[in-house]
């Protein structure tokens, strides 16, 4: 993963990073489809389970980015000090 040129965060640039992001999106989608489809509100337990899965998926992406990429900072365009190996 490389730092984004605009904003804060990372951009997946390798196949493994793209695979991990895709898996996280699939996990969140599966968790959302497991909620009841009937027009009533989900129970508190179902909502807590969904939010726990969502939080775990987001934390996994953040930890993967912190472990394998340069530290994210707020960026607003290209700078002369950009390293092409770290910045997208």
Image (cartoon, helix red, strand yellow):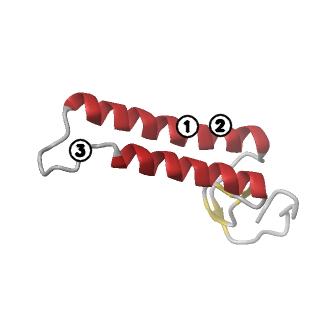
Would residue 76 appear left or right of 58 to someone viewing this image?
right
Earlier along the polypeptide chain: callout 1 or callout 3? 3
Q: Which residue is mark 1?
A: 59
Q: Residues within 10 Å of mark 1 (few under 14, many from 20)?
A: few
Q: Which residue is mark 3?
A: 36
- Front in this rendered view, residue 69 or 50: 50
| Number of numbered callouts drawn | 3
Residue 57 picture location, percent across and down? 52, 40
Residue 70 picture location, percent across and down? 77, 47
Residue 56 picture location, percent across and down? 50, 34
Label 2 close to label 1 by CB (< 8 Å): yes
- Residue lying furthest left: 40
Element carrying mark 1: helix
Tag of residue 19: none
Please say if 41 is above or below 17.
Answer: above
Split into 4 quadrants, where in the image is the C terminus? bottom right
- Front in this rendered view, residue 46 or 57: 46
Rendered residue at 72%/57% (across/down)? 3
Label 1 close to label 3 by CB (< 8 Å): no
* Viewer-nearest of discs 1 and 3: 3
Rendered residue at 69%/44% (across/down)? 65
- Front in this rendered view, residue 73 or 12: 12
Split into 4 quadrants, where in the image is the N terminus? bottom right
Alpha carbon separation for disc pair 3 and 2: 31 Å
Tag of residue 63: 2
Rendered residue at 69%/40% (across/down)? 64
Quarter of the image for residue 80 reads bottom right
Label 3 close to label 2 by CB (< 8 Å): no
Quarter of the image for residue 63 reads top right
């Amino acid at each position: 993963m490389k730092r984004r040129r605009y904003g804060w965060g990372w951009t997946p640039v390798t196949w493994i990073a793209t695979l991990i992001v895709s898996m996280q999106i699939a996990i969140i989608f599966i968790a959302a489809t497991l909620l009841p489809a009937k027009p009533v509100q989900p129970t508190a337990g179902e909502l807590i389970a969904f939010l726990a899965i969502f939080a775990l998926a987001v934390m996994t992406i953040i930890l993967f980015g912190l472990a394998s990429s340069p530290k994210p900072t707020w960026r607003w365009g290209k700078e002369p000090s950009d390293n092409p190996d770290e910045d997208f």
